[in-house]
Amino acid sequence: MFDKVLIANRGEIALRIHRACREMGIRTVAVHSTADANAMHVRLADESVCIGPPAPRESYLNIPAILSAAAITGADAIHPGLGFLAENAEFAQIVGEHDLVFIGPSPEHIRLMGDKVAAKRAAKELGIPVVPGGDAVNDIVHARQEADRVGYPILVKAAAGGGGRGMRVARDQGELETMFPIAQAEAQTFFGNGALYLERFLAKPRHIEVQILGDGQGSVVHLGERDCSLQRKHQKLVEETPSPGLNLTERRRICDLAASTMRKLGYKSAGTLEFLYENGQFFFIEMNTRLQVEHPISEMVTGIDVVREQIRIAAGAALGYRQEDIAFAGHAIECRINAEHPDTFAPSPGTIQRYHAPGGMGVRVDSALYRGYTVPPHYDSLIAKLIVHGSSRNECLMRLRRSLEEFVVSGIETTIPLHQKIMTADAFLNGDYDIGWFERTFDHTL
Ligand code: MV4
């Protein structure tokens, strides 16, 4: 096992990784920007290294600075966390070339899934249903042909995009013709790659993702699915497992399919396959080759520590258990709490005056906040994840409402009041929501 792991991240996820390391007897190295000198992830780590100024490009994305920090502290491995360098195949490769272990998948698998056209083609070849369309289209003539074949309305996506960036809908050929060159230019500017592909546009799907763990030695298991349909502008707000929109047969089908496909690929580490689900059908859209923000809900229902497993696997261990050994118990929901105004979603950085996190039976709070801490303006606004488990969905909801009541964060605006509104909305209580529900129901900024 590793003696020392460098955590190339910040905030609650850096703490989350630190905790797993500590429980495994592994020492930790925190890296931080000058804006994060007083951050909790720096305070808890055994050692810390300042890697640059606040701008992510110059610190958390600064590969030479991070490798230097690993060298001077004598770390054996680097955990990239999520965001930043977590899905950078170059980084994963360079880490390996410096006699360090990258705690994540192989650079080849990161690269494959980073190219959304190649990922879709691979998924299709391995037997996963995909949304009709998906071949790269290079010019408007080809785009028109592909759109006619797939059928309108269509969605134009960037091959190098993902997470909803650079997507546009065309309802007919006229819209496609005006939008296509703009989308191409935009993809070129944002992703340095103008390649586009078209898909049949699904109107009201649910977003279902499957958590998998592979050891690269022939074993792959799934930890069930997560329903991440409750989102605003591609930012997830609430995630739950199991999905209230699936029956047992559908759940088993999609989870087993995801695991068996990743077994064929020889996938190593944690990963998530994203699907859209509409009218009883699943369509693969993307795969994330990293730990995800919402991983704790899968941990709550399975009892499996995903980060611990990532570390064990990276150190060469086999999974050591089979799918049949994993028991799914109860229901879990996560609320993402952001330093944002609950109505306008305007960022609200600043100093925390009062802080009290809820606790008790079935309640977990993953956060790097403390009283007196100043939330910097330079990074993602996620400040806490409230994760609640219950034996049933209803018990989970009751517990979630009482936990939100207990939660005190003052000095900045947070989205806690928004979550209180969601947790009493009929459609949510009935489990009857799709990816557009929140924006149609609550978003008065649109
Ligand atoms: C779609 C879609 C409808 N039809 N593809 C957005 C994020 C990216 N991962 C894929 N996304 C979508 N792809 C087809 N063919 C609707 C979305 C989408 C979405 C998907 C998941 C979660 C939230 C979303 C919000 C808006 C649009």
Image (tube, rainbow, N blue to C red):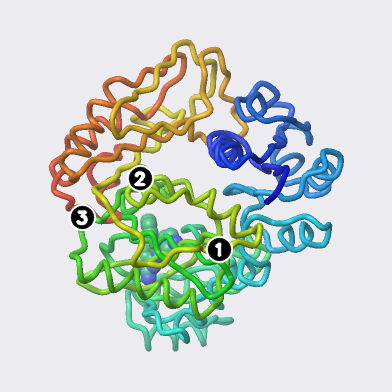
Residue at 17% across / 35% down in the picture? 424
* Front disc: 3 or 2: 2
The disc, 3 or 2, on the residue closer to the chain's N-terminal end is 3
Query: Is there a contact, CB below 8 Å, between mark 1 and mark 3?
Result: no
Q: Which mark is residue 244?
A: 3
* Relative vertical location of residue 221 with respect to residue 79 in this rendering, above or below: below
The disc, 2 or 1, on the residue closer to the chain's N-terminal end is 1
Query: Is there a contact, CB below 8 Å, between mark 2 and mark 1?
Result: no
Judging by the rendered image, the residue that carries numbered circle 1 is 161
Specify the amino acid type for callout 2.
Answer: Met
Left or right: where does residue 431 sit relative to residue 134?
A: left
Residue 321 at what x, y percent from top left? 44, 64
Q: Residues within 10 Å of mark 3 (few under 14, many from 20)?
A: some
Distance in Å between CA atoms under marks 3 and 2: 17 Å
Q: Quadrant of the C terminus?
A: top left
Residue 169 visible at all? no
Q: Is mark 3 within 8 Å of ligand 1?
A: no
* Front disc: 1 or 3: 3
Residue 442 at what x, y percent from top left? 26, 39
Judging by the rendered image, the residue that carries numbered circle 2 is 300
- Label 2 secondary element: helix
* Front disc: 2 or 1: 2
Specify the amino acid type for callout 3.
Answer: Pro
Left or right: where does residue 282 sit relative to residue 107?
A: left
Q: Quadrant of ligand 1?
A: bottom left
